Amino acid sequence: MPEEAALHQEPPVAGYPVSVTVNGKPRSLLVDGAARLLGVLRDELGLTGAKAGCAVGVCGACTVLVDGAPTSSCLTFAAQVDGAEVVTVEGLAAHPGLRALQEDFLAEGGFQCGYCTSGQLVTAASLVLSGELFGLSDADIRERMLGNLCRCGAYYGIVRAIEKAREAG
């Protein structure tokens, strides 16, 4: 009967173990080798702030922070973030210094339809959290935000909001 016992065994688990901190919470995941970070965040962890846009890393709608750096989660394999700290737009609320930035986006009309807003906020937050924002000129701010597209044309409000955060310093 060993053949019968073999028929009832669980199949081996396929995937890569990933230990990652997401928005301050340690997570242990088993991910498919082809799984992108965006899909894992949205489908497995229920964090839907990062959006699927272009799927080639040029629109910025999927931007998250990986160890403090803005990262296109649509291009990043989930297995690549093993041992990393990932912050999504949902995690920005945990950083008290970023509340003003979020309020500035609202006050300055830094969004319209809202689809790109999470990526815009995450990229701007990286400038605040790194301290880089406070040494940037207006032109530098616009350059740092080039990786985030806005089809509605809210660029002026987005840049004004970031400049306002810089001035509040």
Image (tube, rainbow, N blue to C red):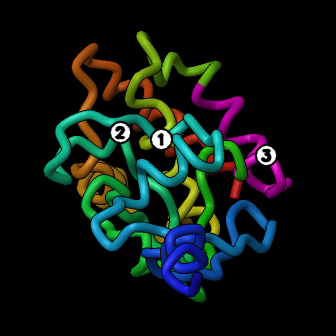
Q: Residue beneath label 1, please?
A: 50
Which amino acid type corresponds to the residue marked 2 in the rendered image?
Ala
Callout 3 crowding tier (Cα within 10 Å): few <14, some 14–19, many ≥20: few
Q: Is residue 81 above or below residue 58?
A: below
Which amino acid type corresponds to the residue marked 1 in the rendered image?
Ala
Q: Is residue 113 above or below residue 108?
A: above
Query: Would you say residue 111 sits in the magenta stretch?
Result: no
Tell me the CA gap for discs 3 and 2. 18 Å
In the image, which disc is placed on residue 158? Answer: none
In the image, which disc is placed on residue 93? Answer: 3
Q: Residue beneath label 2, please?
A: 61
The x, y position of residue 88, in whole percent, is: 59, 52
Q: What stretch is highlighted in magenta?
A: 92-105
Which residue is more in the foreground, 140 or 53?
Answer: 53
Q: Is 79 displayed left or right of 125 in the figure?
A: left
First in sequence: mark 3 vs mark 2: 2
Q: Is 37 displayed left or right of 52 in the figure?
A: right
| Quadrant that contains the C terminus | bottom right
